[in-house]
Amino acid sequence: MNDENAIPRKIPTLLGFALDHLIRAHGWTSKELASRAGVAPSTISAYIWGEGLERDRLEELAGMMELGPAEVERAVLAARLALPPEPAPWTPVDPTEEERRIAEKAAAMAGSETMDLVLEVRLREIREENKRRDLEQGRELARQLKTYSASDQRDLIEGAPDFQHWGLAAVLCADSEAMAPRSPGKALELAERALFVAQHVPGTEAFRRRLEAWCTGFVGNAQRVIGSNLPEAGRTFDRAQRLWSEGKDPAGLFSEAHLFDLEASLRRAQRLFPLARKLHDDALAIARPSEIGVILLNKAFTCQHEGEHEEALQLLRQAAQVIDAERQPRLRCVLLFNQASNLLLLDRAEEAAPVVVEVRTLAERLRNDIDLVRTLWLEGNCAAALGHREKALDDLEQVRREFEARILPFDYALASLDLALLYRREGRFPEIETVADEVLSMFKAQQVHREALGAVMLFQEAAQNEQVTAGLLRRLQAYLSKAESNRELHFEG
């Protein structure tokens, strides 16, 4: 029977237990050792129960009993095996009691000098395996969740413990990030669902705060891509930072570097370039090796938006050193695409041409439809820069049809402006007017925001009056490339 009024047992410290073991195992008593050491017996008793005993003092007392460092080391090892482990910070991938017992046994068999190292390595392996298992379970839960309506999903998460799972939240965040370029609204829905899951995950408050911070960052990323309220996205990232600072993740399940880099994309969209650069650099300072290439790519894209194309190329060269082309072909394709784009913007089409060929090869291997369309767009611009007029016209017209079919109004407009630049070189104003009419029709049909619509109306008016210049087209391109994610940006025609 349990006695609720029983006094809790007092457990010696590691070094105190080792001292007690040395005294008993070698035929001494605490009183005899106290006399030899010139201290009161109560002092030895205090040492055993954890008051002021350091390793140096333990070895000194052992020496008084004519025992050397080897005996002390064995006593410490025995204490480590006999005493219960100190409670570690909780994470959902921590080893179970049985897993920890097996790991400690393996470490003990390695010998006292390497025990800590072996134990650390084994526990890390257990956490990695548990993480992999939990993410697989999260993927299966995500598949099940998709079969329910939005309201039923919330009810399920609130009421079914199986769905209150950190792996599910993590998988929904990854899906949100992947979905953002194609369907920002769906990406926001996934991120908000992940946050709702995080708020119901059992465990310590500290871990839940860190998980909430992670999910909140993806909410902010989706808000950034939608672009209707960038200040709100900024407040979301501020909230993510606050939650992160309030939480703990001793197993390192989540990457602060990735959150920094996501926020950097927002600050770039807000044209807060110094802040975006700082966030990229903060991310690089703490990034895991597997993250460095992606962060360098994103920083290069920020430089490209600033018009710092040479610096962008330098960063892309750095990224090429850490991106594994065989294991990460998608990143390699993005890297080469951006390299070619920057070279074309620097009027270095001859250098860009072989890079464009490599982009085509990779894009065809990856077989992603939208990547293939963008590759054709790059080829059309390269052909135009090299003076291959017919190929440029054919490529850009096909790109426009593809973007129109996919209902991507801003990409359609930007490709149309590339086509208009070709027509402008030849003074073909009727064709430019047709292009302007088509872009305006697309923007109206898709209810593109007022500022961008106004910019295209200025383009149409200039085309009608045969006043379109290459400078106007370039300014409009620069504006529309930013206006998609910033509805408040005004075009200075």
Image (tube, rainbow, N blue to C red):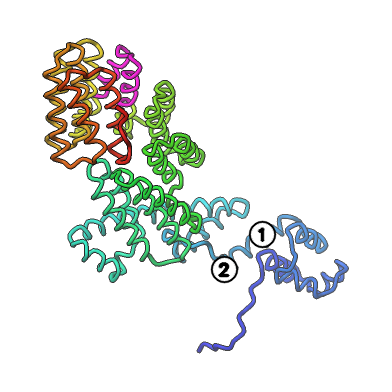
Of the numbered discs 1 and 2, the one sitting upstream in the chain is 1
> In the picture provided, is 82 more to the left or to the right than 36?
left
Q: Residue at x 22, y 60 (%)?
A: 145
Task: State the predominant SS element of the stretch in magenta.
Answer: helix
Q: Which residues are magenta?
A: 336-360
Residue placed under numbered mark 2 in the picture: 84
Q: Choose top left, top right, bottom left or bottom right for residue 493.
A: top left
Residue placed under numbered mark 1 in the picture: 74
User: Which amino acid type corresponds to the residue marked 2 in the rendered image?
Assistant: Pro
> In the picture provided, is 296 more to the left or to the right than 105?
left
Q: In the figure, 92 relative to 442: above or below?
A: below
Element type at mark 1: helix
Residue 338 location (% of width, % of height): 33, 26
Q: Nearer the viewer, residue 66 or 164?
A: 164
Q: Is residue 123 visible?
A: no
Instruction: Please tell me the numbered disc located at residue 111.
Output: none
Q: Nearer the viewer, residue 303 or 139?
A: 303
Q: Residue at x 30, y 43 (%)?
A: 225
